[in-house]
Image (cartoon, helix red, strand yellow):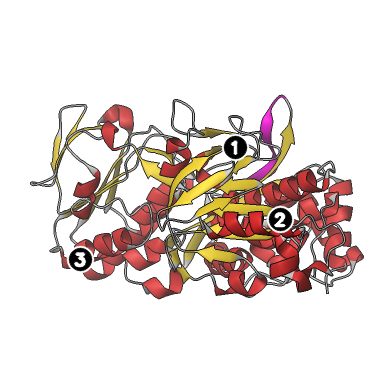
């Protein structure tokens, strides 16, 4: 699937290094492709607010605004 | 001369080179420009950039120039040095890139002429480019190491570019007697992979504790502090009590001169350290091609527009990875991967005549203190015209975490490796 040069794409491509290209992980880090936008958004907010326990994700989530999180959630929910 | 000739030939006929060679790919992209992008260096930066360029615009002609048929990664090379993993497990070829349509040429760049947009290779080929990406990694400032030259790295390995150097250090550790001293000497900032020397110290300690428990590790550091320091020192006390001694630069860590034949280090403070194995990591600069082509500053690194990675010195030349100056981002494989994607977006935006959306960059580095004990540093970055690339969030693993957290991070370190190597080379 072609990748988009959009704001959501720019944000999401940097997630791919750990979660795999298009969010499809080959290893121990969870895949995030095709999950619902609501699920991804909720997870990111919970990581950021410390409501969901994590190792590195709380620290990552601290770098993103609400708007960033919605764009990332929309992007990965659209990846098959 | 085949590329240049083909281009001229196509021009004469009124066809684009793409129509002749990869016409089938055109249908999948409406914005196709058929421009030629030459990428020099097939590590994390260059390989990622090649892949994402084609994902963004499948009509591009991408040529990747990389001398090695298999690229051995620095990440996880400390597991090879200490015999936990085989060299093959960290080596990656370019077949996926070729299947995607990237032309891979295994050669070395001899010269870049940015005024006529040509790259000359050591196999005699001359390639024309519309956009050039350099991802040449690092080279060493041997002039700054008194008593030692590049050739002496056969005896005193740096193992800071993976490959033969990795095996030399592994073999030296394997053949040394128990009860001796291993010196690891990290350089002054900036250098490739800030936490790397200290992961190496940790994993060497892991190896020695199992095989040569009377051996000591002396860390002679050029610096007075280092990445994830509290976490590393806590881990050394916990996992390898009494085995690791770290000496800061101002307290006798800085090395003045190397005596290669006797494996002795003379420090600025006047001390002499004779060791069984010395891992001296020299001060660094951008990879050779970036320097000889005139894209670096007086410190040996390449100034770029940190939003696009286009060289401040030459238009249509982009420099990514360890070789470039990227604001607050460290020199790491992960940073190079992140920059490769931003650079790919910048290049296609420029070719399409569009504005690139606001970039976002990430770094995530795991370090293993043992195969079951991992720590990490993570950061998210943005760009600002006045500040360059700056950090918006992130942090390091907590100091008070329990063993299950460290084990989980060690598992994620392996997952990280599987994902990023797939994202770059797969």
Alpha carbon of mark 2 to alpha carbon of mark 3: how far?
Answer: 70 Å
Question: Is residue B18 one of those drawn in magenta?
Answer: no
SS at badge 3: loop
Name the residue that disc number 3 marks: B212
Disc 2 is placed on an element classified as helix
Residue B8, given in percent of the width and then of the height, sits at 65, 54
Q: Is residue B162 left or right of residue A80?
A: left
Along the line of sight, which residue is nearer the eye, B4 or A19?
B4
Left or right of B154? Residue B305 is right
Magenta residues (range):
B386-394
Q: Are marks 3 and 1 on the same chain?
A: yes
Q: Residue beneath label 2, please?
A: B12
User: Do the residues indicated by labels 2 and 3 lie within the same chain of the protein?
Assistant: yes
Q: Give the residue at x 58% y 29%.
A: B313
Chain label for disc 1: B
Asked if labels 3 and 2 touch by Cβ distance under 8 angstroms, the answer is no
Q: Which residue is mark 1?
A: B326
What is the quadrant of residue B22 in the picture? Answer: bottom right
Which dot, 2 or 3, sits closer to the camera? Answer: 2
Q: Position of residue B275 (x, y in %)?
A: 15, 49
Give the residue displayed 13% in from the left and 47% down from the top: B263
């Amino acid at each position: 699937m072609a990748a988009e040069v959009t704001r959501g794409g720019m944000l999401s491509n940097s997630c791919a290094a750990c979660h795999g290209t298009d969010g499809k992980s080959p290893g121990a880090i969870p895949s995030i492709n095709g999950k619902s936008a609501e699920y991804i958004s909720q997870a990111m907010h919970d990581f950021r607010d410390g409501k969901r326990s994590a190792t590195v994700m709380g620290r990552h989530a601290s770098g993103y605004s609400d708007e960033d999180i919605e764009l990332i959630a929309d992007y990965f929910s659209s990846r098959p | 001369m085949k590329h240049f000739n083909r281009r001229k030939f196509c021009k004469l006929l009124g066809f684009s080179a793409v129509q002749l060679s990869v016409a089938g790919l055109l249908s999948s992209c409406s914005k196709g420009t058929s421009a030629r992008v030459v990428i020099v260096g097939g590590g994390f930066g260059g390989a990622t950039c090649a892949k994402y360029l084609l994902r963004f615009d499948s009509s591009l002609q991408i040529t990747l120039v990389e001398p090695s048929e298999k690229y051995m990664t620095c990440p996880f090379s400390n597991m090879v040095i200490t015999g936990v993993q085989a060299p093959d497990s960290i080596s990656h070829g370019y077949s996926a890139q070729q299947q995607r349509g990237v032309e891979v040429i295994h050669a070395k760049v001899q010269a870049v002429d940015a005024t006529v947009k040509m790259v000359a290779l050591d196999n005699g080929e001359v390639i024309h480019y519309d956009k050039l990406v350099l991802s040449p990694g690092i080279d060493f400032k041997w002039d700054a190491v008194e008593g030692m030259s590049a050739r002496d790295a056969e005896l005193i390995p740096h193992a800071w570019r993976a490959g033969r150097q990795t095996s030399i250090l592994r073999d030296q550790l394997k053949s040394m007697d128990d009860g001796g001293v291993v010196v690891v000497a990290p350089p002054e900032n900036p250098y490739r992979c800030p936490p790397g020397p200290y992961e190496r110290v940790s994993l060497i300690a892991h190896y020695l504790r199992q095989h040569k428990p009377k051996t000591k590790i002396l860390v002679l550091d050029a610096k007075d502090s280092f990445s994830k320091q509290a976490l590393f020192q806590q881990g050394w006390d916990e996992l390898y009590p009494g085995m690791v001694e770290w000496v800061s630069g101002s307290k006798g860590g800085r090395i003045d001169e190397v005596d290669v034949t006797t494996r002795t280090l003379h420090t600025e403070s006047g001390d002499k350290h004779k060791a069984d194995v010395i891992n001296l990591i020299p001060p660094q600069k951008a990879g050779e091609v970036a320097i000889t082509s005139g894209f670096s500053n007086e410190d040996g690194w390449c100034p770029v527009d940190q939003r696009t990675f286009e060289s401040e010195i030459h238009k249509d030349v982009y420099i990514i990875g360890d070789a470039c100056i990227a604001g607050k981002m460290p020199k790491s494989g992960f940073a190079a991967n992140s920059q490769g994607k931003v650079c790919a977006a910048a290049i296609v935006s420029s070719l399409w005549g569009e504005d690139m959306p606001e970039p976002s960059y990430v770094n995530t580095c795991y370090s293993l203190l043992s195969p079951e004990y991992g720590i990490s540093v993570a950061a998210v970055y943005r760009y600002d015209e006045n500040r360059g690339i700056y950090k918006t969030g992130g942090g390091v693993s907590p100091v008070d975490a329990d063993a299950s957290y460290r084990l989980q991070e060690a598992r994620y370190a392996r997952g990280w490796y599987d994902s990023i190597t797939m994202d770059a080379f797969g």
